[in-house]
Image (cartoon, rainbow, N blue to C red):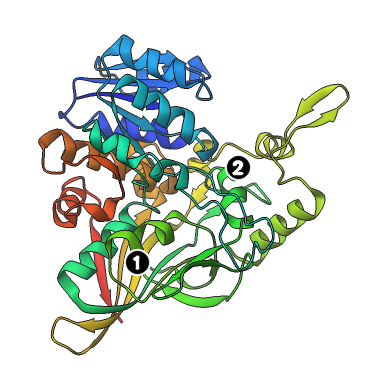
Amino acid sequence: MRILAVGAGGVGSAAASIAARRDFFELFVVADYDLGRATRAASNTEDPRFVAAKIDATDQDAVAELCREHGITHVFNAVDPRFVMPVFEGAAAAGAHYLDMAMSLSKPHPVSPYEETGVKLGDEQFAVAESWESDGRLALVGIGVEPGLSDIFARYAADHLFGEIDEIGVRDGSNLVVEGFDFAPSFSVWTTIEECLNPPVIWEKGRGWYTTEPFAEPEVFDFPGGIGPVECVHVEHEEVLLIPRWVEARKVTFKYGLGTEFIDVLKTLRKLGLDKTEPVRVKGVEVSPRDVVAAALPDPATLGDRMTGKTCAGTWVTGTGKDGNPREVYLYHLVDNEWSMREYGAQAVVWQTAVNPIVALELLAAGTWSGAGVLGPEAFDPVPFLDKLVEYGSPWELQER
């Protein structure tokens, strides 16, 4: 296996450090628009299998050319979702397989954005699924932690724990604190703004996909690992678009534990127009307001040594168990920032995201997972993945509720 990782930010760099401990590949190219950043990520592994390259992720031809130059078999997309399609199409042009952690962007319904879906997350990728399948190539989409591991939990619950499922609800929360900053998101603020301010999507059997207003239906969810109760709200996320395609359930939701302060900041950004991606002219220079916000905030990849606490990603499932009795479980993955920094030099949120595509790549390299077309994590047997996660030293857990 010869891998091209596009993006050497927090997740891309963490993925390189995780992969460096495994032997399933022969080459791992770390590519970024900032060659210095790519070089640091590659050299930090101290592994000759890693090389750095410069790339423009907006240019599908550049992606394809780099794939051909290095004989790439698998493209691993670790950049913001605005770059999904050129990286996706570049991989296709080069005849490579493809993995990402976020899918092609949505566009709200032009008339009823808080009731009806417009262009949904992943629609552009699923539109060409037939050509990927006919070419015998795999695009494994949404294989981070959320989406990714959360989807695998849903498939595991359906296969091994439940006879009928009422609701699959992905729930994400943490007690992470970053010292020295009044406001410092632990993940890409560009992506955070996108998913939190877009109309959240809900899926119900018989109704299909529909939308609601951002931050709707707050609920307090009690997270394990000492995190405790956190208020969670509806957020647009890929799981709701992926899980119903492969897993039977009456309802699928995604709620994120953002906190009141975070929500207030996001609402203020929207009021001021600072969430917009369309460039505005400032003193003769064209600049995207959202890019300005991202540039003004600290890089999440650099916050690990100032961060304390744990992050929890998981899937809450209710329904009827295999024995016919009511059942409610929470399958989850917990990462302590102190552990991830000590073991990998990566803060908890980016490490938790990065480990899952590396596990998936190893399963694909071994032939344990295989397929063609545009597929979500739910399309594969979850057990080998969950076993491999334990092997990587970061076990998942199941809580009966």
Q: How many marks?
A: 2
Q: Secondary structure at mark 1?
A: strand
Q: Nearer the viewer, residue 32 or 335?
A: 32
- In the displayed orientation, state which residue is furthest to the top: 69
> Where is residue 71 shown, x and y percent of the image?
26, 14
Res. 301 in view: yes
Relative side of 334 to 305, left or right: left
Q: Amino acid at mark 2?
A: Trp
Res. 40 in view: no
Q: Which residue is mark 1?
A: 315
Q: Is residue 181 above or below residue 44?
A: below
> Where is residue 297 shown, x and y percent of the image?
66, 40
Residue at the spot 28% in from the left edge and 82% down from the top edge = 319
Residue at the spot 51% in from the left edge and 20% down from the top edge = 59
Q: Nearer the viewer, residue 110 or 179?
A: 110
Q: Nearer the viewer, residue 328 or 241?
A: 241
Q: Which residue is mark 2?
A: 190
Q: Is residue 183 above or below residue 156?
A: above
